Each structure stands twice: as structure tokens, then as C-alpha cells.
Amino acid sequence: MKNILIVATTSYAGMGPYVAEIVNSFNAQDNVFFFFCDYEDDYFKKNVNTELHDKSFFYKRINSKWNKVKDLCSNKYAYHNDIIRFCSKWDVALVHFINNPGSIALVRDLKRLGVECVSTVHDLHPHEAKKMWYKMLRWRIINKRLRENLEYCVNLVTNSKEQYNELKYLYPNKRVFFHSFPSLVTKAITEGKDIPRELLNNDMPYILFFGRIEEYKGIRLLYEAFTQTSDLYDKYSLVIAGKGEISFLKSNTDKNVKIINRYIKDTEIKYLFEKACCVVYPYISATQSGVLSLAFYFGVPTLTSDVPFLKNIIGEFNDERMLFQNGNIADMTGKLIAILNSDCTDMVNEERVYYQNYYDNMAIRKDLLSIYSLLEKK
């Protein structure tokens, strides 16, 4: 097989572990090279296996407001020419944009060099969003650009079976592939020993939401269910751990609602999950996500909405406590109370078995190498 280049343009909002776990499934003997855009925290440099560093290019870029503005003003990556040079230096035959479809300008220039491109599609349809006006403007521009780039792409990969089927239907002339979503459980997470400072004095059992705070994740519904139900509010605290805008919070001094509104270090995640009585993902919509891998790995009783992506996974457990009707606060409350008041040993055991059977990153390597080989022979 000819040389492949995987391009990761961001480690933002869960993309870091997503990319790292896929990349780390490869070994130094594979004909696969890597281009990473790293921010100030050097996430990729720290989390990509050192044996792959000789085949990697770490492009350092400050995650500043100025750079974000510059990105909005141009549909050309700041590292456009670096990727072109890298492809020429390493005689790359195929580039895989693992975070997004890749800009039209870059894909076009790569085609001129005879380089094939394949793009991972994460969200075919934009999720619900509610942000400050200037953030909404940026969000709209980015999504418009992603759509244009997607339309230009010929080879697409997704980690959602529903999205795979829709892409095949929408784009019958494109080549569409599927591989399973990677586990987001990294070595830094499993070996983490840090306790979030916000929980140092917490002596109440807690219900956990973990992840970046976005409108489509339905956190507002979980907050309402918790604060309006004495069986929950009087016995537990609600921990919302993740960075984002929280417009639904009624009181900043609510002792039973603990907001960790910041970037959560990988070394803090183990404590968050191991100490939780239950983790809730009340998503209004979800295309694909790896958050369940964290809950399943740590054996935490789990409750999710019945959006298709989550329902397809949870449906294999045959445990009606684990799913509630999307948007139905009463159903969420009833299922949450049922989990908290029952023995969840069977549920936890099934979660761990599912993790062992399905979150196999080595299988992802095999699938991707097969996709690359097929594209090379087309």
C-alpha cells in the first residue's frame, strides 16, 4: 500500500481523544503518516504514541480569538502549504481528513498533485445550538463551509450507521464507508488520579453529566428534572462537568447543583465517573458520540435519551431503565429514580462486556487500512 497521511486539524471538544485513539491503533510499520494541529496544551504530542512521532508533523497554532477570526475570513487552512509540502516529501498517495471534510482549496490542490482524499463526516446535520450572537454567527459560517466542503468531497467515512445510510442515499455517486466509533478511554484517563477541585468538599452522592455543554445535549432537561423532583434533589447532587454556556441555571448558589464549567483534564475523568451513582446523557439529537465508552469502561449505570444513535447501542442491553423518551422530562425522572433505587449489577456487567466486545481500536485500524486499500485500487 502507498503512503497515507491522516490530517487532524483540532483536538477541541472531544476530538482530541477521538483522534488519538484512532491514531494509536496504528504502528510504526504501517505506511501511515500524521499531521496534527496542536494548541497550547500540546494534546496530540502528549497523547500520540512516541513510536509514531517520527512519522508525525506537529503544527503548533495558538487557539486565540484572532486566529479564529482569520479562519472565518478564509476557507484556506493556515497550514495549507505545510500539508502540501508534507505530501510531496513523503510521497503521499491519499490524505484522510479525520476531523472534517477538508477545505475545497486544499482538496483541489492535492488532486492536482495526484493525491486522493477521504473525509470523516461527524455531523451531517448541524445540532441545535444556543450561544451568544457572535458565536452563533461563527457557528453558521463554519457549518455553511462544512456543507460546501462536504458537497465537494468524493470519498466519505462515518462512524454512524444511520448517517452512513443517509449519506449513501443523498450522495449515490460518492464512495461512502463506515467504521465503528473509537473508545475515548485513553491511558491518561485510566491512570488519572486528580480530583476536580470543585468536588473536594462534596459529601453527597451525585448524578453526572459529562461533556461539552451544548444546547443539543439536553442538559437543560436534566437540570429541570433534578431540581423539580424532591426524590432526586434531596438525596443527590447534580454534577455538570464540561465547558460551555449555561443559560438555564436559576441560581449560582444552588448547593445541590455543582457546575464544573471549564476544560476537564483527562486525569480528572476517572474520579468523575468512578464516584458517580449514575451518568445521564439527555441528548436532543446525536449523530455519533464516544461518551458511552467512558461510562461503560468505568461501569457506571447509564441513562440516555432514545435518539437513534444512542438507542441502537443501549437497545442491545435489553434494560428498559437505560432509555427514556427524547424530550420527556417525566420519563427521564422516572427512569433515573428507577436506576438509583435498584440493583444495577447486571447493567454494569453488560456495559463492561459491551466495551470489551465493541470498543476495539485494533479493529478500527484494520477497517481503515481496508478503506485506504480500496481507494488506492479504485
Image (cartoon, rainbow, N blue to C red):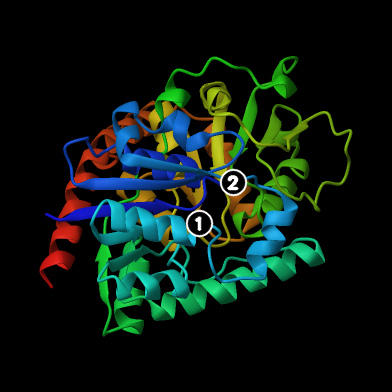
Q: Is residue 287 visible?
A: no
Q: CA distance from mark 2 to mark 1?
A: 9 Å
Left or right of 289 in this view: 2: left
Q: Position of residue 108 (x, y in %)?
A: 38, 76
Mark 1 highlights which residue? 79
Residue 61 badge: 2
What's the residue at 15%, 56% (across, down)? 2
In the displayed structure, does residue 207 sit left or right of residue 44? right
Residue at image point 44% right, 46% down = 36
Q: Is residue 108 above or below residue 233?
A: below
Residue 268 position by quadrant = top right
Under circle 2, the secondary element is: loop
* Amino acid found under the numbered disc labelled 2: Arg
User: Looking at the picture, how far across and down is residue 275, in whole percent?
Assistant: 56, 21
Amino acid beneath label 1? Tyr
Tag 2–tag 1 contact (CB < 8 Å): yes
Residue 134 in view (yes/no): yes
Q: Nearer the viewer, residue 251 or 111?
A: 111
Q: Is residue 339 above or below residue 123?
A: above
Q: How many marks?
A: 2
